[in-house]
Amino acid sequence: SQQGEEDPQALSIQEGENATMNCSYKTSINNLQWYRQNSGRGLVHLILIRSNEREKHSGRLRVTLDTSKKSSSLLITASRAADTASYFCATDVMGNTPLVFGKGTRLSVIA
Amino acid sequence: DAGVIQSPRHEVTEMGQEVTLRCKPISGHDYLFWYRQTMMRGLELLIYFNNNVPIDDSGMPEDRFSAKMPNASFSTLKIQPSEPRDSAVYFCASSFLYSIHPAYGYTFGSGTRLTVV
């Protein structure tokens, strides 16, 4: 079963706007990661946030983590057409287990 | 490094045939993962290896699926016999030493799109 669930399933915005994607998970985690997948390609690691962190930035990406609500958000600021992709959150459940991925959010950025 | 290399990129086969998917992980990574991606089920972990040893294969759907890692630079996923419901994109990923949850995340290959007709 899926540990993480992204919301919305699909998002369409204009270039220059901000895109926000959310991820909810079920059990306690060690860290949460976000990945991007372009059409027909493999997943690419974007950012990792540890369970004791609340916010992290990387370029135009901002990730927040609320462990009390078991949720995370990924914000992409000033979006570009090249940001069009699917975005996945992935969690590692407390303990020695591999990443479990959600089903992703499909982001379309219209030029 | 060229990244995680998977072959073939596309495979079309007839039901009942044997299919072998191949993966070359990043040199120095000591964990290797096989995932399957479908629209319905998303990304599912099939099996993973640590230092060439299979750690957990509970995600392998049936006995028709088998995976090997004979050395640190090569792994195979075999389906025999293949069925139409095996149609999916199969990804191989690798990660660094010391932890299966490294700061740098997993590095994925480009995947093999398998179609069983």
Image (tube, coloured by chain):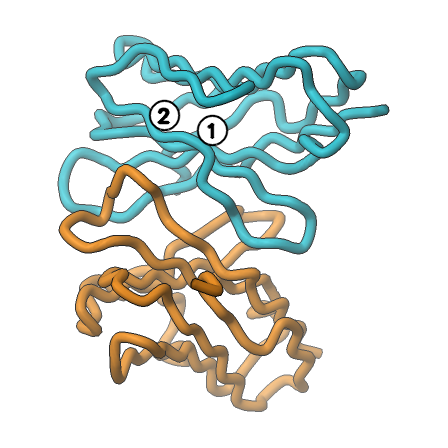
Q: Residue at position x 54%, y 15% from top?
A: A75
Q: Looking at the image, is mark 2 or mark 1 earlier in the sequence?
A: 1
Relative to B102, is A94 above or below?
above
Q: What element carries label 1?
A: strand
Relative to A95, is B116 above or below?
below
The subunit letter for the residue under badge 1 reads A
Quick one: B16 or A25, which is closer to the camera? Answer: A25
Picture quadrant where residue A107 is located = top right
Quick one: A86 or B94, which is closer to the camera? Answer: B94
Picture quadrant where residue B102 is located = top left
Relative to A10, is A35 above or below?
below
Amino acid bearing label 2: Tyr
Amino acid bearing label 1: Glu
Q: Distance between the residues labelled 2 and 1?
A: 6 Å
- Rendered hue of chain B is orange
Horizontal and vertical percent position of residue B63: 35, 78
Residue at the outermost front position: B1
Q: Residue at position x 32%, y 24% from top?
A: A49
- Rendered hue of chain A is cyan
Picture quadrant where residue A70 is located = top left
The subunit letter for the residue under badge 2 reads A
Q: Residue at position x 42%, y 77% from top?
A: B77
Q: What element carries label 2?
A: strand
For the residues beneath circles 2 and 1, the answer to whether they share a chain is: yes
Horizontal and vertical percent position of residue B31: 25, 60
Q: Do the residues labelled 2 and 1 touch (CB within 8 Å)?
A: yes
**Which mark, residue A5?**
1
Left or right of A58? Residue B51 is: left
- What crowding class fits label 2: few (fewer than 14 Cα within 10 Å), some (14-19), or many (20 or more)? many
**Which mark, residue A25?**
2
